[in-house]
Image (cartoon, grey):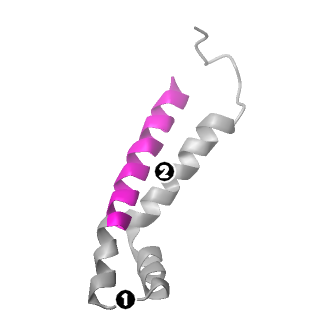
Amino acid sequence: MTRIFFFLLGFGFSIIGFMYMILYFNLFTIGFSLLDYFKYIIQRPECIIGMIGILLIFLTIFYKGDKKNDICI
């Protein structure tokens, strides 16, 4: 049950973070280069949350924990 919670939490974080990354594509229209864009993205906390979300998803999928708390269907 905890793996499902962390998977959904990571999914929500990644949706929020990548939504902001797509919204920040508008910076190209005011003259930002690709390097400036990546420097700006790294500094924004909502975009870092997206990377944390991807990390949570990978950990919940590939981490082999103890089997006593998992529900087998």
Q: In which quarter of the image is residue 27?
A: bottom left
**Label 2 secondary element:** helix
Please provide percent x and percent y for residue 31. 32, 91
The boundaries of the magenta stretch are 1-22
Mark nearest the camera among 1 and 2 is 1
Residue 26 versus residue 17 in the image, above or below? below
Label 1 environment density (alpha carbons within 10 Å; few <14, some 14–19, many ≥20):
some
Q: Identify the residue at horizontal 61%, vertical 10% (top origin).
A: 72
Instruction: Work out whether residue 41 or residue 45 is closer to the camera in this orientation and state it.
Output: 41
Q: Is residue 27 above or below residue 46?
A: below
- Label ID, residue 18: none
Identify the residue position indicated by label 1 in the image.
32
Q: Residue at x 43, y 77 (%)?
A: 43
Q: Residue lying furthest top in this view?
A: 73
Label 2: few (<14), some (14–19) or many (≥20) C-alpha neighbours in 10 Å: many
Where is residue 14? Give x, y as percent. 43, 51
Residue at image location 46% in from the left, 32% down from the top: 5
Residue 53 — which label? Answer: 2
**52 is higher (above) or lower (below) than 20:** above
5 part of magenta stretch: yes
Q: Which amino acid does label 1 sit on?
A: Phe
Is tag 1's residue or tag 2's residue first in the polypeptide sequence? Answer: 1
Provide residue 22's location: percent of width, then percent of height: 35, 65
Residue 35 placement, left or right of 58: left
Q: How far apart are marks 1 and 2 (CA)?
A: 26 Å
Quadrant of the image occupied by residue 71:
top right
